Amino acid sequence: MSMGVRKMKAQFEGKVIIKAVHDADLNSFLEKLGLLEDMKNGRLRCSFCNCVLTFDNFGGVYKEDGQIKLFCQKTECYLEVLKRKNAPK
């Protein structure tokens, strides 16, 4: 196990609940959130790295301060979501 993986594992030990949407259901999921047209037209951006979100690089959504936020599939952006979800409130 590499040093980075060990550090990451230690940082996120414990229970993390992840809800998933299958690729086949992504369009209807985004439609329910009112985001489908924005996704199709390249108007959505990752909350962390600011890249344009596409169906190929979409990582997921999370709620923060009552708002729906999106992130791409880059590892560092996903890890940032985990950090924020695990941060004391």
Image (spheres, rainbow, N blue to C red):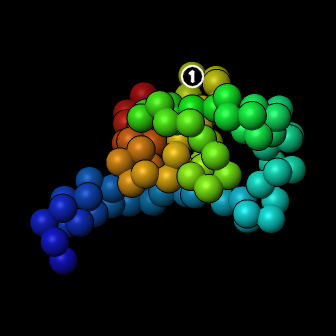
Q: Which residue is drawn at 82% across and 51% down?
A: 27
Q: Identify whether 38 is placed above or below 83.
A: above
Say whether residue 21 is visible.
Answer: yes
Q: Quadrant of residue 13?
A: bottom left
Say whether residue 33 is visible.
Answer: no
Q: Identify whether 57 is placed above or below 52.
A: below
Determine the secondary structure under disc 1. loop
- Name the one closer to the observer, 80 or 39: 39
User: Residue 6 appears at what percent x and percent y?
Assistant: 19, 66
- Name the one closer to the observer, 4 or 13: 4
Q: In which quarter of the image is residue 23?
A: bottom right
User: Residue 30 appears at what percent x and percent y?
Assistant: 79, 43
Q: Which residue is drawn at 60% across and 50% down?
A: 58
- Name the one closer to the observer, 29 or 36: 36
- Name the one closer to the observer, 85 or 27: 27
Work out which quarter of the rendered image holds the C terminus and state it.
top left
Instruction: Residue lying at the far left in this picture: please name it.
Output: 3
Q: In this view, does 31 lie to the left or right of 14?
A: right
Work out which quarter of the rendered image holds the N terminus and state it.
bottom left
Q: Identify whether 30 is placed above or below 7.
A: above
Instruction: Residue lying at the far front in this picture: please name it.
Output: 41
Q: Residue at x 67, y 34 (%)?
A: 42
Q: Name the residue under label 1.
A: 65
User: Residue 9 appears at what percent x and percent y?
Assistant: 27, 63
Q: Which residue is drawn at 77% across and 54% down?
A: 26
Residue type at numbered disc 1 = Asp
User: Residue 80 appears at what percent x and percent y?
Assistant: 38, 42
